[in-house]
Amino acid sequence: RYTGCEDLTLAGTNTLIQFAVSTVVDEFTVNNDLNIAASGARFNNHDGTNGKHLKLGHNLDVGSGARFDSNIGSTTAFTGRLALNGTTVQNITVDPAGFFGGSVLQTQTAASTSANQIGVLNQLEINNTATATSNVVWNVPVTRIKSNLIFTNARVNVTTGNRFVIGN
């Protein structure tokens, strides 16, 4: 239920990390960097049905053709939550040919709560204690927050050409 590591790199083509099916909100902590580097590599912050809780202490890098998916979950605490809880500046970067969220494109005019949507995070929590003017640098194309957006000690620099959309 509570697991973790110092650094995690998915370097093999089509590498997959996904939780076992369980209604328990499992928690995984990466103390430093999560690097999803290889084309086809995926980190699914869910079990296919239930969202899980990922705590990240430093950077998240999603490479070309790779995917970080945390779009499954509800408004229930910690389900499908990405928690950025660093003590130094955190860089969240998705390559223009990489993916954040699921694999189904959601149109701008269609509001939906269905799972598996590109560019959607279920919950985002930022509690970064670094004293830098921006303690999180968000270099990710349009990111939709489906359920909860929680900022505690958060000073986020959303880089040029990127943005958050609150609500799905």
Image (cartoon, helix red, strand yellow):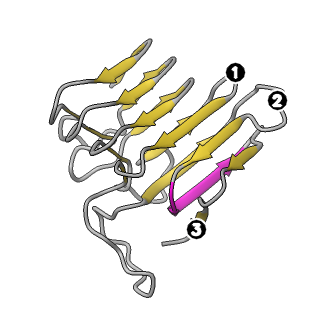
Residue 15, percent from left and from top: 18, 31
Residue 74: x and y in percent read 42, 59
The foreground one among 120 and 152 is 120
What residue is shown at x 33% (from left), y 64% (from top)? 117
| Residue found 33% across the figure and 21% down from its top | 9
Give the quarter of the image for residue 165: bottom right
Q: Residue at x 59, y 59 (%)?
A: 162
Q: Which residue position is annotated with label 1?
A: 87
Q: Residues within 10 Å of mark 1 (few under 14, many from 20)?
A: some
| Residue hosting label 2 | 132
Q: What is the span of residues highlighted in magenta in the rendered image? A: 141-151
Q: Position of residue 55 (x, y in %)?
A: 50, 30
Q: CA distance from mark 1 to mark 2?
A: 10 Å
| Residue 139 versus residue 36 in the image, above or below | below
What secondary structure is marked by label 3?
strand
Per the image, the residue denoted by label 3 is 165
What is the spatial separation of the Cα atoms under label 3 and label 2, in whole angstroms?
Answer: 25 Å
